[in-house]
Amino acid sequence: MSIYRILKSYIVLAVLLVGTVPFLHAQDNSSDSLEVFFRQGYSNWDPNLKNNEQRVKEFVERFEILRQDPIMERIASIQIISGASPEGPWALNQRLSINRAKCVRNVLAQYIDLPDSVVVVDSRGVNWQGLEAMVAASDMQYRDEVLDIIRNTPELDQSRGYNYELRKKTLERLHGGRPYAYMYRNFFPPLRSFFLKIAVDWKKYEQIKQEVQILPTDITLKVDPMPRPEMPPMPYVLTPPKELPPFYMAIKTNMLYDLAITPNIGVEFYLGNNYAITGNWMYAWWKNHHAHWWHRIYGGDLEVRRYFGALAEEKPLQGWHVGIYGGIVTYDFEWGKRGYLGDRWSYGGGVSLGYSMPFKRRFNIDFTLGIGYLGGEYKEYLPFDDCYVWQATKQRNWIGPTKLEVSLVWLIGRGNYNKGK
Protein backbone atom coordinates (compact mmCIF):
# COMPACT_ATOMS: atom_id res chain seq x y z
CA MET A 1 0.00 0.00 0.00
CA SER A 2 1.52 3.35 -1.06
CA ILE A 3 2.24 6.13 1.39
CA TYR A 4 -0.03 8.41 -0.62
CA ARG A 5 -2.97 5.98 -0.31
CA ILE A 6 -2.39 5.62 3.44
CA LEU A 7 -2.25 9.38 3.98
CA LYS A 8 -5.31 9.95 1.79
CA SER A 9 -7.29 7.26 3.61
CA TYR A 10 -6.33 8.72 6.98
CA ILE A 11 -7.45 12.20 5.97
CA VAL A 12 -10.86 11.03 4.70
CA LEU A 13 -11.37 8.81 7.74
CA ALA A 14 -10.57 11.76 10.01
CA VAL A 15 -13.23 13.81 8.22
CA LEU A 16 -15.75 11.05 8.87
CA LEU A 17 -14.85 10.88 12.54
CA VAL A 18 -14.94 14.63 13.07
CA GLY A 19 -18.34 14.76 11.43
CA THR A 20 -19.67 11.88 13.49
CA VAL A 21 -18.48 12.89 16.98
CA PRO A 22 -20.64 16.03 17.28
CA PHE A 23 -23.68 14.06 16.22
CA LEU A 24 -23.18 11.39 18.82
CA HIS A 25 -22.78 13.85 21.67
CA ALA A 26 -25.15 16.62 20.59
CA GLN A 27 -28.04 16.41 18.16
CA ASP A 28 -26.95 19.10 15.73
CA ASN A 29 -26.74 19.33 11.95
CA SER A 30 -23.03 18.50 11.66
CA SER A 31 -21.10 18.20 8.41
CA ASP A 32 -21.71 14.48 7.92
CA SER A 33 -25.11 13.96 9.50
CA LEU A 34 -28.62 14.78 8.36
CA GLU A 35 -31.52 16.28 10.30
CA VAL A 36 -35.03 16.68 8.93
CA PHE A 37 -38.32 17.58 10.63
CA PHE A 38 -41.94 16.41 10.74
CA ARG A 39 -45.15 18.17 11.66
CA GLN A 40 -46.76 17.23 14.95
CA GLY A 41 -48.59 13.90 14.72
CA TYR A 42 -47.55 13.25 11.10
CA SER A 43 -45.08 10.91 9.41
CA ASN A 44 -45.52 12.08 5.82
CA TRP A 45 -42.69 13.92 4.06
CA ASP A 46 -42.90 17.72 3.86
CA PRO A 47 -39.98 19.01 1.73
CA ASN A 48 -40.73 22.65 2.56
CA LEU A 49 -40.74 22.28 6.36
CA LYS A 50 -37.57 23.89 7.76
CA ASN A 51 -35.72 23.38 4.42
CA ASN A 52 -36.05 19.59 4.56
CA GLU A 53 -35.45 19.14 0.84
CA GLN A 54 -32.36 21.33 0.84
CA ARG A 55 -30.95 19.46 3.83
CA VAL A 56 -31.34 16.12 2.03
CA LYS A 57 -29.71 17.39 -1.18
CA GLU A 58 -26.71 18.78 0.70
CA PHE A 59 -26.27 15.48 2.54
CA VAL A 60 -26.46 13.55 -0.75
CA GLU A 61 -23.74 15.78 -2.24
CA ARG A 62 -21.44 15.06 0.69
CA PHE A 63 -22.24 11.37 0.49
CA GLU A 64 -21.41 11.18 -3.22
CA ILE A 65 -18.01 12.82 -2.60
CA LEU A 66 -17.17 10.08 -0.10
CA ARG A 67 -18.53 7.44 -2.43
CA GLN A 68 -16.02 8.37 -5.15
CA ASP A 69 -13.08 7.86 -2.81
CA PRO A 70 -11.45 4.46 -2.10
CA ILE A 71 -12.15 4.96 1.63
CA MET A 72 -15.84 4.37 0.90
CA GLU A 73 -15.36 0.75 1.90
CA ARG A 74 -14.76 1.97 5.47
CA ILE A 75 -18.43 3.14 5.78
CA ALA A 76 -20.16 0.14 7.27
CA SER A 77 -23.73 1.39 7.68
CA ILE A 78 -26.22 4.22 7.40
CA GLN A 79 -27.98 4.48 10.75
CA ILE A 80 -31.41 6.10 10.94
CA ILE A 81 -32.37 7.38 14.38
CA SER A 82 -36.00 8.49 14.58
CA GLY A 83 -38.21 9.68 17.42
CA ALA A 84 -41.26 11.67 18.48
CA SER A 85 -42.15 14.27 21.09
CA PRO A 86 -43.95 13.14 24.29
CA GLU A 87 -47.42 14.55 23.53
CA GLY A 88 -49.90 12.05 22.14
CA PRO A 89 -50.55 8.42 23.19
CA TRP A 90 -47.59 6.10 23.69
CA ALA A 91 -48.68 3.64 20.98
CA LEU A 92 -49.11 6.47 18.48
CA ASN A 93 -45.61 7.77 19.21
CA GLN A 94 -44.17 4.31 18.61
CA ARG A 95 -45.87 4.12 15.21
CA LEU A 96 -44.83 7.68 14.35
CA SER A 97 -41.21 6.91 15.15
CA ILE A 98 -41.18 3.83 12.92
CA ASN A 99 -43.11 5.44 10.06
CA ARG A 100 -40.89 8.54 10.08
CA ALA A 101 -37.78 6.40 9.72
CA LYS A 102 -39.36 4.50 6.81
CA CYS A 103 -40.43 7.77 5.21
CA VAL A 104 -36.92 9.25 5.17
CA ARG A 105 -35.48 5.91 4.06
CA ASN A 106 -37.73 6.13 1.01
CA VAL A 107 -36.78 9.76 0.39
CA LEU A 108 -33.06 8.93 0.46
CA ALA A 109 -33.68 6.02 -1.93
CA GLN A 110 -34.71 8.59 -4.55
CA TYR A 111 -31.19 10.05 -4.48
CA ILE A 112 -28.88 7.26 -3.30
CA ASP A 113 -28.82 3.54 -4.07
CA LEU A 114 -28.73 2.15 -0.53
CA PRO A 115 -28.73 -1.65 -0.11
CA ASP A 116 -30.85 -2.83 2.77
CA SER A 117 -27.77 -4.48 4.27
CA VAL A 118 -26.19 -1.11 5.16
CA VAL A 119 -29.32 0.60 6.51
CA VAL A 120 -29.90 0.30 10.27
CA VAL A 121 -33.13 1.76 11.72
CA ASP A 122 -33.10 2.82 15.37
CA SER A 123 -36.71 3.77 16.20
CA ARG A 124 -36.86 5.22 19.71
CA GLY A 125 -40.51 6.16 20.17
CA VAL A 126 -40.51 9.22 22.44
CA ASN A 127 -37.11 10.91 22.28
CA TRP A 128 -36.59 11.16 26.04
CA GLN A 129 -32.79 11.34 25.60
CA GLY A 130 -33.11 14.44 23.47
CA LEU A 131 -35.56 16.05 25.93
CA GLU A 132 -33.24 15.34 28.86
CA ALA A 133 -30.33 16.98 27.04
CA MET A 134 -32.34 20.13 26.26
CA VAL A 135 -33.66 20.44 29.80
CA ALA A 136 -30.19 19.94 31.28
CA ALA A 137 -28.78 22.70 29.06
CA SER A 138 -31.58 25.16 29.87
CA ASP A 139 -32.35 27.48 32.76
CA MET A 140 -36.06 26.61 32.85
CA GLN A 141 -38.00 26.82 36.10
CA TYR A 142 -38.16 23.53 38.11
CA ARG A 143 -35.31 22.18 35.96
CA ASP A 144 -33.91 19.75 38.54
CA GLU A 145 -37.33 18.28 39.35
CA VAL A 146 -38.05 17.74 35.65
CA LEU A 147 -34.67 16.01 35.16
CA ASP A 148 -35.32 13.79 38.18
CA ILE A 149 -38.64 12.63 36.70
CA ILE A 150 -37.16 12.00 33.23
CA ARG A 151 -34.22 10.04 34.64
CA ASN A 152 -35.86 8.09 37.47
CA THR A 153 -39.56 7.65 36.66
CA PRO A 154 -40.40 4.64 34.44
CA GLU A 155 -41.85 5.55 31.08
CA LEU A 156 -44.72 3.06 31.45
CA ASP A 157 -46.57 1.46 34.33
CA GLN A 158 -48.03 -1.88 33.27
CA SER A 159 -49.43 -2.86 36.67
CA ARG A 160 -52.89 -1.64 35.61
CA GLY A 161 -53.09 -4.14 32.77
CA TYR A 162 -52.26 -1.59 30.07
CA ASN A 163 -49.58 0.96 29.23
CA TYR A 164 -50.14 3.81 31.67
CA GLU A 165 -47.76 6.62 30.66
CA LEU A 166 -46.36 7.22 34.13
CA ARG A 167 -43.44 9.48 33.21
CA LYS A 168 -45.48 11.80 30.99
CA LYS A 169 -48.42 11.96 33.43
CA THR A 170 -46.04 12.84 36.26
CA LEU A 171 -44.55 15.66 34.20
CA GLU A 172 -48.01 16.95 33.28
CA ARG A 173 -49.04 17.16 36.95
CA LEU A 174 -45.82 18.77 38.16
CA HIS A 175 -46.56 22.28 39.53
CA GLY A 176 -49.92 22.50 37.80
CA GLY A 177 -48.50 21.63 34.37
CA ARG A 178 -46.37 24.80 34.04
CA PRO A 179 -43.05 23.01 33.35
CA TYR A 180 -44.79 20.72 30.85
CA ALA A 181 -46.37 23.69 29.06
CA TYR A 182 -42.95 25.36 28.83
CA MET A 183 -41.36 22.23 27.34
CA TYR A 184 -44.32 21.83 24.97
CA ARG A 185 -43.66 25.29 23.52
CA ASN A 186 -39.86 25.29 23.52
CA PHE A 187 -38.51 21.73 23.47
CA PHE A 188 -41.08 19.45 21.84
CA PRO A 189 -40.88 20.79 18.24
CA PRO A 190 -37.19 19.80 17.77
CA LEU A 191 -37.94 16.34 19.18
CA ARG A 192 -40.08 15.65 16.11
CA SER A 193 -36.94 15.70 13.96
CA PHE A 194 -35.16 12.76 12.38
CA PHE A 195 -31.42 12.11 12.41
CA LEU A 196 -29.14 10.13 10.11
CA LYS A 197 -25.43 9.51 10.52
CA ILE A 198 -22.60 7.64 8.85
CA ALA A 199 -21.20 4.77 10.92
CA VAL A 200 -17.53 3.75 10.52
CA ASP A 201 -16.11 0.21 10.46
CA TRP A 202 -13.67 0.47 13.40
CA LYS A 203 -11.88 -2.80 12.69
CA LYS A 204 -10.61 -1.50 9.38
CA TYR A 205 -9.65 1.75 11.08
CA GLU A 206 -7.48 -0.23 13.52
CA GLN A 207 -5.88 -2.04 10.55
CA ILE A 208 -4.94 1.32 8.99
CA LYS A 209 -3.30 2.39 12.26
CA GLN A 210 -1.20 -0.78 12.30
CA GLU A 211 -0.12 -0.30 8.69
CA VAL A 212 0.95 3.26 9.46
CA GLN A 213 3.00 2.09 12.44
CA ILE A 214 5.13 -0.33 10.31
CA LEU A 215 6.16 2.31 7.76
CA PRO A 216 9.94 2.72 7.17
CA THR A 217 11.70 4.67 9.89
CA ASP A 218 12.92 7.35 7.50
CA ILE A 219 9.34 8.56 6.97
CA THR A 220 7.85 10.70 9.70
CA LEU A 221 4.03 10.73 9.94
CA LYS A 222 2.36 12.62 12.77
CA VAL A 223 -1.13 11.48 13.66
CA ASP A 224 -3.03 13.17 16.46
CA PRO A 225 -4.81 10.65 18.71
CA MET A 226 -8.56 10.78 18.24
CA PRO A 227 -11.01 9.55 20.87
CA ARG A 228 -13.34 6.82 19.79
CA PRO A 229 -16.91 8.00 20.33
CA GLU A 230 -19.38 5.81 22.09
CA MET A 231 -22.31 4.61 20.02
CA PRO A 232 -25.72 5.67 21.37
CA PRO A 233 -27.43 2.93 23.37
CA MET A 234 -30.15 0.99 21.63
CA PRO A 235 -33.58 1.67 23.10
CA TYR A 236 -35.12 -0.85 25.42
CA VAL A 237 -38.16 -2.59 24.03
CA LEU A 238 -41.30 -2.99 26.12
CA THR A 239 -43.74 -5.73 25.27
CA PRO A 240 -47.00 -4.72 26.92
CA PRO A 241 -49.55 -7.37 27.81
CA LYS A 242 -52.30 -5.28 26.29
CA GLU A 243 -52.22 -2.05 24.30
CA LEU A 244 -55.28 0.17 24.40
CA PRO A 245 -55.66 2.37 21.31
CA PRO A 246 -56.24 6.12 21.66
CA PHE A 247 -59.89 7.14 21.87
CA TYR A 248 -61.44 10.56 21.23
CA MET A 249 -65.08 11.51 21.68
CA ALA A 250 -67.08 14.46 23.00
CA ILE A 251 -70.48 15.24 24.52
CA LYS A 252 -71.85 18.71 23.86
CA THR A 253 -74.84 21.01 24.18
CA ASN A 254 -75.80 23.98 22.00
CA MET A 255 -76.01 26.88 24.45
CA LEU A 256 -78.14 28.93 22.03
CA TYR A 257 -80.86 26.25 22.19
CA ASP A 258 -80.48 26.13 25.96
CA LEU A 259 -81.17 29.86 26.13
CA ALA A 260 -84.28 29.25 24.00
CA ILE A 261 -85.50 26.68 26.58
CA THR A 262 -84.87 23.81 24.18
CA PRO A 263 -82.90 21.02 25.89
CA ASN A 264 -80.44 19.34 23.53
CA ILE A 265 -77.46 17.01 23.50
CA GLY A 266 -74.84 16.04 20.96
CA VAL A 267 -72.18 13.34 20.63
CA GLU A 268 -69.07 13.42 18.45
CA PHE A 269 -66.70 10.56 17.59
CA TYR A 270 -63.27 10.85 15.99
CA LEU A 271 -62.88 8.56 12.95
CA GLY A 272 -59.19 9.15 12.19
CA ASN A 273 -57.30 11.23 9.62
CA ASN A 274 -58.96 14.39 11.02
CA TYR A 275 -62.48 13.13 10.21
CA ALA A 276 -65.27 12.98 12.79
CA ILE A 277 -68.99 12.23 12.90
CA THR A 278 -71.34 14.15 15.16
CA GLY A 279 -75.03 13.76 15.98
CA ASN A 280 -77.37 16.19 17.79
CA TRP A 281 -80.90 15.83 19.21
CA MET A 282 -83.27 18.38 20.79
CA TYR A 283 -86.64 18.00 22.53
CA ALA A 284 -89.00 20.62 23.96
CA TRP A 285 -92.68 19.96 24.58
CA TRP A 286 -93.87 22.95 26.57
CA LYS A 287 -97.49 24.25 26.61
CA ASN A 288 -99.74 26.73 28.43
CA HIS A 289 -103.50 26.31 27.88
CA HIS A 290 -104.55 29.66 29.40
CA ALA A 291 -102.27 31.84 27.24
CA HIS A 292 -102.33 29.53 24.23
CA TRP A 293 -98.58 29.38 24.47
CA TRP A 294 -97.04 26.48 22.60
CA HIS A 295 -93.34 25.75 22.19
CA ARG A 296 -92.93 22.25 20.84
CA ILE A 297 -90.04 20.98 18.79
CA TYR A 298 -87.99 17.83 18.47
CA GLY A 299 -85.53 16.53 15.93
CA GLY A 300 -81.86 16.33 15.17
CA ASP A 301 -79.11 16.17 12.61
CA LEU A 302 -76.12 14.06 11.63
CA GLU A 303 -72.89 15.62 10.35
CA VAL A 304 -69.55 14.42 8.98
CA ARG A 305 -66.69 16.82 9.68
CA ARG A 306 -63.14 17.32 8.47
CA TYR A 307 -60.84 19.21 10.86
CA PHE A 308 -57.89 21.24 9.56
CA GLY A 309 -55.38 23.87 10.63
CA ALA A 310 -52.60 24.09 13.19
CA LEU A 311 -54.74 23.07 16.19
CA ALA A 312 -56.12 20.06 14.32
CA GLU A 313 -52.57 18.85 13.72
CA GLU A 314 -51.87 18.94 17.46
CA LYS A 315 -54.87 16.90 18.60
CA PRO A 316 -58.19 15.60 17.19
CA LEU A 317 -61.53 17.42 17.63
CA GLN A 318 -60.16 20.95 17.74
CA GLY A 319 -59.45 23.77 15.32
CA TRP A 320 -61.25 24.67 12.09
CA HIS A 321 -63.71 22.22 10.58
CA VAL A 322 -65.96 21.90 7.52
CA GLY A 323 -68.82 19.45 7.26
CA ILE A 324 -71.85 18.09 5.45
CA TYR A 325 -75.01 17.56 7.48
CA GLY A 326 -78.62 16.47 7.18
CA GLY A 327 -81.49 16.56 9.68
CA ILE A 328 -85.19 16.24 10.44
CA VAL A 329 -87.52 18.24 12.72
CA THR A 330 -91.16 18.62 13.77
CA TYR A 331 -92.55 21.68 15.53
CA ASP A 332 -95.60 23.58 16.83
CA PHE A 333 -95.18 27.27 17.65
CA GLU A 334 -98.01 29.58 18.80
CA TRP A 335 -97.78 32.55 21.15
CA GLY A 336 -101.44 33.67 21.35
CA LYS A 337 -101.83 34.58 17.69
CA ARG A 338 -101.23 32.67 14.46
CA GLY A 339 -99.70 29.24 14.98
CA TYR A 340 -97.43 27.11 12.79
CA LEU A 341 -97.66 23.33 12.98
CA GLY A 342 -95.25 21.01 11.24
CA ASP A 343 -96.70 17.70 12.39
CA ARG A 344 -94.89 15.81 9.62
CA TRP A 345 -91.13 15.59 9.39
CA SER A 346 -89.44 18.57 7.81
CA TYR A 347 -86.06 17.76 6.37
CA GLY A 348 -82.96 19.64 5.38
CA GLY A 349 -79.21 19.64 4.99
CA GLY A 350 -76.26 21.70 3.92
CA VAL A 351 -72.61 22.52 4.48
CA SER A 352 -71.09 23.89 7.66
CA LEU A 353 -68.02 25.81 8.72
CA GLY A 354 -66.88 26.12 12.31
CA TYR A 355 -64.10 26.43 14.84
CA SER A 356 -63.62 24.38 18.02
CA MET A 357 -61.58 26.42 20.52
CA PRO A 358 -59.82 24.82 23.52
CA PHE A 359 -61.29 26.32 26.69
CA LYS A 360 -60.25 24.18 29.65
CA ARG A 361 -58.32 20.95 29.99
CA ARG A 362 -61.39 18.87 29.11
CA PHE A 363 -63.63 21.50 27.47
CA ASN A 364 -63.91 23.28 24.13
CA ILE A 365 -66.25 25.95 22.79
CA ASP A 366 -67.51 25.12 19.29
CA PHE A 367 -68.83 27.78 16.90
CA THR A 368 -70.65 26.44 13.82
CA LEU A 369 -72.70 28.00 11.02
CA GLY A 370 -74.53 25.89 8.44
CA ILE A 371 -75.98 27.04 5.10
CA GLY A 372 -78.39 24.80 3.25
CA TYR A 373 -82.01 23.84 2.51
CA LEU A 374 -85.04 23.21 4.76
CA GLY A 375 -88.26 21.88 3.28
CA GLY A 376 -91.50 20.26 4.37
CA GLU A 377 -95.23 20.73 4.80
CA TYR A 378 -96.68 22.86 7.59
CA LYS A 379 -100.11 24.22 8.63
CA GLU A 380 -101.12 27.71 9.72
CA TYR A 381 -103.89 27.98 12.36
CA LEU A 382 -105.57 30.50 14.67
CA PRO A 383 -106.45 29.75 18.32
CA PHE A 384 -110.06 30.45 19.46
CA ASP A 385 -110.80 29.51 23.07
CA ASP A 386 -110.03 25.81 23.23
CA CYS A 387 -110.17 25.35 19.46
CA TYR A 388 -107.53 25.77 16.78
CA VAL A 389 -108.88 26.77 13.40
CA TRP A 390 -106.95 25.63 10.36
CA GLN A 391 -106.13 28.43 7.93
CA ALA A 392 -103.87 26.98 5.25
CA THR A 393 -101.46 24.18 4.42
CA LYS A 394 -98.20 25.34 2.87
CA GLN A 395 -94.91 23.98 1.66
CA ARG A 396 -91.71 25.40 3.08
CA ASN A 397 -88.69 25.78 0.76
CA TRP A 398 -86.06 27.71 2.65
CA ILE A 399 -82.51 28.26 1.43
CA GLY A 400 -80.17 30.01 3.81
CA PRO A 401 -78.82 29.49 7.37
CA THR A 402 -80.23 26.24 8.76
CA LYS A 403 -77.72 25.53 11.53
CA LEU A 404 -76.25 27.75 14.23
CA GLU A 405 -74.27 26.45 17.20
CA VAL A 406 -72.33 27.87 20.11
CA SER A 407 -71.73 24.60 21.91
CA LEU A 408 -70.04 23.67 25.16
CA VAL A 409 -67.99 20.54 24.39
CA TRP A 410 -66.87 18.03 27.01
CA LEU A 411 -63.87 15.98 25.83
CA ILE A 412 -63.86 12.28 26.76
CA GLY A 413 -61.32 9.55 26.06
CA ARG A 414 -57.70 8.48 26.55
CA GLY A 415 -55.41 11.42 25.80
CA ASN A 416 -58.35 13.62 24.81
CA TYR A 417 -57.42 16.74 26.72
CA ASN A 418 -56.03 20.16 25.87
CA LYS A 419 -52.30 20.53 26.47
CA GLY A 420 -51.21 23.26 28.83
CA LYS A 421 -54.77 24.03 30.00
Image (cartoon, rainbow, N blue to C red):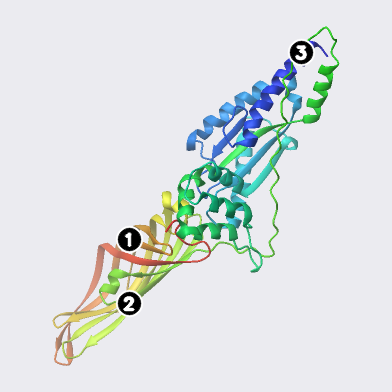
Whole-percent x, y for residue 240 in the image: 68, 61
Q: Nearer the viewer, residue 384 or 85?
A: 85
User: Which element type, helix, strand or loop, lies under badge 1?
Assistant: strand
Whole-percent x, y for residue 92 in the image: 58, 55
User: Which element type, helix, strand or loop, lies under badge 2?
Assistant: loop
Instruction: Estimate how packed mark 1 is, as few (under 14), some (14 to 19) or many (20 or more) residues with alpha carbons within 10 Å.
Output: some
- Asked if disc 3 and disc 2 are in contact, CB closer than 8 Å, the reply is no
Residue that badge 3 annotates? 221
Give the residue type that dot 3 points to: Leu
User: Mark 1 against mark 3, which lies toward the viewer?
Assistant: 3
**On screen, residue 269 above or below 131:** below
As drawn, the label of residue 367 is 1
Whole-percent x, y for residue 264 in the image: 35, 75
- Could you tell whether 405 is left or right of 32 in the image? left
- Asked if disc 2 and disc 1 are in contact, CB closer than 8 Å, the reply is no
Lower sequence index among marks 3 and 2: 3
Lower sequence index among marks 2 and 1: 2
The residue at the point 53 percent across, 55 percent down is 88
- Could you tell whether 370 is left or right of 162 in the image? left
User: Mark 3 against mark 2, which lies toward the viewer?
Assistant: 3
Which image quarter holds the C terminus?
bottom left
- Could you tell whether 39 is left or right of 111 in the image? left
User: Which element type, helix, strand or loop, lies under badge 3?
Assistant: loop
As drawn, the label of residue 92 is none
Give the residue type that dot 2 points to: Pro
Lower sequence index among marks 1 and 3: 3
Q: CA distance from mark 2 to mark 1?
A: 18 Å
